[in-house]
Each structure stands twice: as structure tokens, then as C-alpha cells.
Image (cartoon, rainbow, N blue to C red):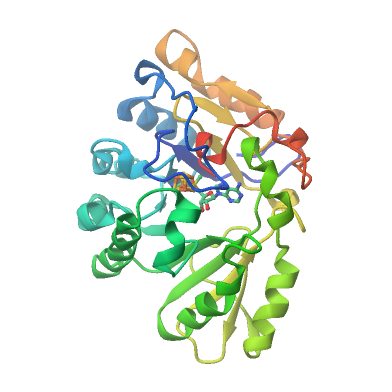
Amino acid sequence: MKDGLGRSINYLRISVIDKCNLRCTYCMPVAGFEWIPKSEILRYEEIQAIVREMAGMGLRRVRITGGEPLVRQDLPELVRQLRTIPEIEDISMSTNAILLPRFATELRLAGVDRVNISLDTLRRDRFEEIARRPVRLFDETMHGIYAAERAGFAPIKINTVLLRGLNDDEVADFARATRNKPWHVRFIELMPVGENLHLADRFIGTDEVLERLLEIDELLPDEGPRGNGPARYYRFAGAPGSVGVITPLSHNYCDSCNRLRLTADGRLRTCLFGDHEVDLKTPLRSVGSVRAAVESALLDKPERHLLVMGSDKGSGGLGALSQVGG
Ligand code: SAM
Ligand code: SF4
């Protein structure tokens, strides 16, 4: 698939639910969010039909995300359905890992190739402040990471959003973990959306993060793990894991963007930010052509996002990244 600017598009992020079992301070408000009504949420068969159509147009990789995807009932069933589409070469998932002790093995058997796990702190005493849910869920997260390892998921990528004064003193701890474990820790810049604008002064650019990493030891540029997207990777000599940075704000990578997003209620978003989206649910549920809707969306995919720190103007009115899967 090519977009109107000639970029090759082969990757779809599928948000399967807008709900979550955490309330990460940069992501979701603690309360007052309106959930998508169940009747509006795409059924697994409908997601499969959309992916099948897009696979015929050139889609090769999908990532299942949320909200928290494992909060949705019987998620392995969706994976099994997506696995029946021969063109899809890679199925990955983004999760906070809390439910992985229950689901890791079943997901692996169902056909998930890789998991990315969100983990913003290694310190139990900090979890509640960041995730705004009881600390026992920190223990579940850690169990979830080990369950993923035991189930054979590799590489394991860890996504860490750094917030100045909250968890930025853990950069070195996360980095050191890559010397002992085959973890690929990616530091993600905070993106300003919805109610998180008050966190603007906690933003840390990844250039500063790299400087701090270099204080630990020499870092070698690295190819990074399989399935790498916009992250830049580095490795300490001899380390089994790597550290990476994802820089949506300080250095955007829109000119090589290869992705689309499908919301839980069936809107195809051509950019993480902004308000450009095309409804796929209506053509899917009534008479119409999903393919024609995808083609029209591709033509209008924006050249770049217009996000700037400290303002939600470029976000297109997005309330939280949990609504579009990050
Ligand atoms: N619940 C799953 C998880 O946490 O991995 C999947 C959905 S979550 C929205 C996907 C990713 O978006 C996570 O890595 C999370 O850290 C990131 N994210 C959410 N809000 C963000 C923000 N405001 N700035 C940067 N990253 C954000
Ligand atoms: Fe939930 Fe993921 Fe958002 Fe945290 S980042 S609130 S785990 S959707």
C-alpha cells in the first residue's frame, strides 16, 4: 500500500478496547472518561474482515493494543482469527503485562510473535504514583514479564515513558537491566494529549537521556531487536539487551511512517495525532466497500503530525493515547 506521498504502508495497530486496568498518569484520566458502547466496538470477526481486506492491499504486520488489550474477553481468539490470514507475517502486542501470567502461553500458542511491555518503574514504591492503581498490580506486571519470557516471547521490548522528577532517576537502573537480561528497553518521550498537559514540565527529550546513558558506559549503535519501528538503538558492549529511544517530539520520524491505526470502534486513523480518520465500520456493517474507504484514507494521510510540547493543539482533540492504542 502506498499513501498519497508515496510512503509504503504495511503495518496496522489495532486497538481492541478503550478500557484499561491501569490509569497511567500520562495516559488516562483516573475517572470521568466515557467508554465506547459495546455495540460500537468491532467484533473479532469484523477486525479479521478488515485485516483480510487490507492484507490483500499489502498489509503485512499487525500490533494488537488498547487501552489494555488483555482486558478484552478471550483475546487469544482474535489472534487465532488473524493467524488464518496468510499474508500477515507478524502479529505483536502492546500490553502492561498484568494479565500475562494468565494469558502468555495461550497467546504464544495462538500465534503472537512478540510482545512490548509497558513498565515505567522498577520500584514497587513508585508504581501507585505513576499507574494510579494498587501496588499488587506492580507484582502482577513483574510476574507477567517473567511469564512472557517463560512462554518463549523474544525479543521482549520494554516501553518506558520518562517523567522528570517521577522516574527519570531510574534511567541507569533500566539500562543496567539490559546488561543482565535480553530486554530491549525503549525510552519514549512524553506526548502531550488531553489532560496530561500539566505534565509538560516533566518532559525529558531523549538527547538528555542518551547523555545520561553515556555517563554509565560506552554505548555502541545497534540494529535493535526484530520488528524495530521508529526507535534508535544502542548497546553496552557484551550486553544481551539494548537501550533505545523513541522521539516523536524532539526528532519526528513522519517521513518514514509506515503505519495506520484502527480504533476499537472501527475508525481508521492515518496519523496518531490530528483528526484525520475514515469510518470503516459503516461500510463493513452495511453495504459499502472497506477497500475504497482504506484507499481514500491512504490518499489523505497527513505528511506529519503537528504536535508541540505544552499544547494539545496538534493532537486533534484526542483525550488519551489509550483511545487510539498509542
Ligand atoms: N496498555 C498497553 C500498554 O500500556 O502497553 C497498550 C496501550 S498504551 C496506550 C501503548 C503505549 O502508549 C504504551 O507504551 C504507553 O506507555 C504509551 N503512551 C501512552 N500515553 C502516552 C503519552 N502521553 N506519551 C508517550 N507515550 C504514551
Ligand atoms: Fe493503560 Fe497502557 Fe494507558 Fe497505562 S499506558 S493507562 S496501561 S493504556
Residue at the location (77% across, 48% down)? 309
Residue 94 visible? The answer is yes
- Height in image: 206 above or below 74? below
Quadrant for residue 320, please give it: top right
From the top left corner, tell me how far across and down residue 78 is, in percent.
Answer: 30, 38
Q: Would residue 113 be found to the left or right of residue 265 on screen?
A: left
Establish if 176 lies above or below 321.
below
Image vertical order of residue 311 relative to residue 291, above or below: below
Q: Residue 137, image x and y in percent?
A: 32, 55
Q: Can you tell which quarter of the image residue 204 is in?
A: bottom right
For residue 118, say whether it is visible.
no
Q: Position of residue 54 (x, y in %)?
A: 49, 34
- Residue 101 to residue 146: above or below: above
In this rendering, position of residue 95 left or right of residue 185 = left
Residue nearer the viewer, 114 or 308? 308
Residue nearer the viewer, 73 or 64: 73
Number of numbered markers:
0
Decide if residue 120 is on the left or right side of residue 69. right
The image quadrant where one finds the C terminus is: top right
| Quadrant in which the N terminus appears | top right
Asked whether, in this view, residue 111 is left or right of residue 211, the answer is: left
What percent of the width, then of the height, locates residue 295?
Answer: 61, 26
Residue displayed at 64% across by 46% down: 8
Front position in the image: 324 or 202: 202
Residue drawn at x 68%, y 84% is 214
